[in-house]
Amino acid sequence: MRIYLDVCCFNRPFEDQSQIRVRLESEAKLKIQEEIRSGRFQLAWSYVLDYENNKNPYQERKERIKSWKKYAVSDIQERSELLEEADLLNRKGLPNIDCLHIACAILSGCEYFLTTDDRILQRGKVIDSIKVYDPIGFIKEVFS
């Protein structure tokens, strides 16, 4: 099973763990990472992840997120087909950068797009070509 994690998903374990939602999503995300390392899940990567992660002001976080690229089975680059898919997603009310992430996931053949961004999770319900979940919802669906 191929999955795509956006930057906010990768950043979740670095956030304030005193909030129960953040802590649970972090634990779920760490479990997903274990499954990527074991080969149960395939990770897709993209130039959009590189771009957004490079803007991270925290050097250690940036490097730790970047280190996950070595586990990726694909690394999608910008091309016209991707921009067309992103434009279609944008028409459904998703912001530009999020459209690019999701388009990369779709064109990488991912079944799931994982995020902790409530805006994407809400609008992701209108996307038919990929399942948009938070890490907890993904764990509940895949491991039940």
Image (spheres, rainbow, N blue to C red):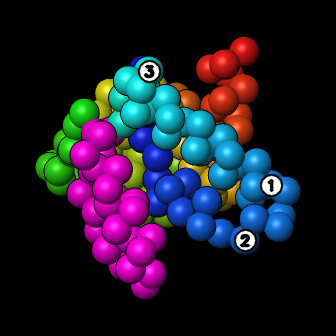
The residue carrying mark 1 is 21
Question: For numbered disc 1, what is the local secondary structure?
Answer: helix
Number of numbered discs: 3
Looking at the picture, how far across and down is residue 77, in whole percent? 17, 50
Q: Earlier in the sequence, mark 3 or mark 2?
A: 2
10 Å neighbourhood of mark 2: few (<14), some, or many (≥20)? few
Residue numbers of the magenta segment: 44-72
Residue type, numbered disc 3: Arg
Question: For numbered disc 2, what is the local secondary structure?
Answer: loop
Position above or below: 140 against 106: above
Question: For numbered disc 3, what is the local secondary structure?
Answer: loop
Q: Quadrant of the N terminus?
A: top left
Foreground pick, 19 / 75: 19
Q: Which mark is residue 40?
A: 3
Looking at the picture, how far across and down is residue 22, in whole percent? 74, 58
The residue carrying mark 2 is 16
Q: Earlier in the sequence, mark 1 or mark 2?
A: 2
10 Å neighbourhood of mark 1: few (<14), some, or many (≥20)? few
Marks 1 and 2, how far apart at CA: 10 Å
Q: Which mark is residue 54?
A: none
Residue in view at x 80 percent, y 54 percent: 21
Residue in view at x 49 percent, y 29 percent: 35
Looking at the picture, how far across and down is residue 93, in whole percent? 55, 56
Dot 1 and dot 2 residues touching (CB under 8 Å): no
